[in-house]
Amino acid sequence: MNQRDGTDGATPAASKGTGELKPGTGSLAAAPASSLTHPAPAVADLAIYLTAMLGAIALGLGISDYFFDHPYVCAYLIAYAGFVFAEHLVGTAEARGNPDPAFSYTKGRIPILILFFAAPFERTYIYGGDAPGWAAALGLLLELLGLWLALGARIQWSYFAAAAPESARKGIISSGFYRRIRHPIYAGSFLVLLAWPFEYGSPITFVVVLAVGVIVLRREIAFEERALVRAYGEEYAAYQRTTDSMIPGVW
């Protein structure tokens, strides 16, 4: 879901990968010895650890019964976890070093944790009861569609990146998942996140995720494509004129 979304493995030097983790500019020699031997955990990593700990406690208190009573929620979470694992397996070394923001294990995961909290919170404290069965089933269907799109596009990009020799990594991938839209990994990942509020019938969470996601993606796509036009010139501009960013005929 970075600048490689729509190219055949060439990463323009001038582009900024969406959510990339930038390497530190300081040298190791300048760092205190204590920071090298005992690095302080990032706040985001600590938050993730505490969340996992609370999840383990909840599991011990009987949350497994909840999953048996809500099979669509359980299926969503299993599919999501499987995708995160698969996304890292099919990614190149560069992709594994700079995971997509929606599936990273650092600060990029905090908004996802908030989303996963907000939907059940809205259902429990505003509406009560369980989400309609049709909504939960639709959410699972949307998630599976998003996973197919995002993972399929990732596999296609990784295949082209690995198959082409370094001297041939030029031009634009415009077939397969990239034939109609330029950012299928973005589109699929975003669809996965939009599906979660359906599992709990949480319209407020859905609207917030939709609005914030569209704003963020428009900004990131615009920045990324300016870099791609600088790198590939008329070739990428022509590709832009014949495709849409995320949704054929809409966006």
Image: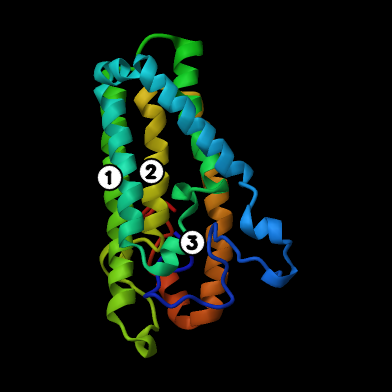
Residue at disc 1, secondary structure? helix
Q: Are marks 2 and 1 in contact (CB under 8 Å)?
A: yes
Residue 145: which disc?
Answer: 1
Q: Residue 238 sits in which quadrant?
A: bottom left
Q: Earlier in the sequence, mark 2 or mark 1?
A: 1
Three-letter residue code for mark 2 = Leu
Residue 53 in the image: state x and y as whole percent: 47, 29
User: Does 111 sit above or below residue 225?
Assistant: above
Q: Dot 2, how many residues are within 10 Å of its Cα: few (below 14), some (14-19), or many (20+)?
A: many
Badge 3 is on which residue? Answer: 98
Amino acid, disc 3 = Asn
Counting residues from the start of the chain, the first of labels 1 and 3 encountered is 3
Q: Nearer the viewer, residue 39 or 126?
A: 39
At x 31%, y 27%, the residue is: 73
Image marks 3 and 2: residues in contact by CB distance under 8 Å: no
Determine the residue positioned at 35% across, 63% down.
91
Q: Name the residue under label 2.
A: 191
Cα separation between marks 2 and 1? 8 Å
The 10 Å Cα crowd at callout 3, few under 14, some 14 to 19, many 20 or more, is: some
Which numbered dot is residue 175? none
Measured in 3D between alpha carbons, the distance from the residue under mark 3 to the one under mark 2, in whole angstroms, is: 21 Å
Q: Quadrant of residue 151?
A: bottom left
**Secondary structure of residue under mark 3:** loop
